[in-house]
Amino acid sequence: MFTGDGSSKNIPKNFTLIHSSPAVYLIRNFLSNSELDYFDTMCTHYGPKFKASFTGTDNDEEVISEERTSTFISLSKSQDKFVRGIEQKAAGLVGRFVNS
């Protein structure tokens, strides 16, 4: 259907090429409303468990950076129906790029 090199004219309407080499696409409406609600619930529930992001040093050490302010939590592979559904959607898109 389309390729990952940014050259195909048959790219779906919800894809926007934002960088051509390598090809990087913005995929509008990738997550459904229920998936967004899921992540909202996860952030509300697990918010206190978020960890500060870290950076690497020249000595390959991981340190908390004063300049970096992001926080994160980790999701387990196939942890529930929402994560499995998102994984399947993402795999389908990757398959389109790889198998074109």
Image: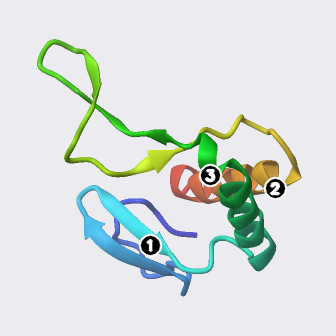
Residue identified by numbered label 2: 82
Amino acid type at image mark 3: Gly
Q: Residue furthest right?
A: 81
Q: Is 14 rendered above or below residue 75?
A: below
| Secondary structure of residue under mark 1 | strand
Among the 4 quarters of the image, the one containing residue 89: bottom right
Please identify, in this view, whether the residue under mark 2 or under mark 1 is nearer the observer.
2
Residue 98: image location, x then y, percent:
53, 49
Relative placement, left or right, of 79 versus 98 is right
Residue 44: image location, x then y, percent:
69, 60
**Spatial separation of the CA atoms under disc 2 and disc 3:** 19 Å
Q: Residue furthest left?
A: 58
Q: What residue is shown at x 46% (from left), y 62% (from top)? A: 3
Q: Residues within 10 Å of mark 1 (few under 14, many from 20)?
A: few
**Residue toward you, 57 or 3:** 57
Amino acid type at image mark 2: Phe
Q: Is 89 rendered above or below residue 77?
A: below
Relative placement, left or right, of 24 versus 47 is left
Residue identified by numbered label 3: 47
| Secondary structure of residue under mark 3 | helix
Q: Quadrant of the N terminus?
A: bottom right
**Spatial separation of the CA atoms under disc 3 and disc 1:** 27 Å
Q: Residues within 10 Å of mark 2 (few under 14, many from 20)?
A: some
Q: What residue is shown at x 42% (from left), y 59% (from top)? A: 4
Label placed on residue 85: none
Residue identified by numbered label 1: 26
Q: What residue is shown at x 86% (from left), y 45% (from top)? A: 80
Please identify, in this view, whether the residue under mark 2 or under mark 3 is nearer the observer.
3
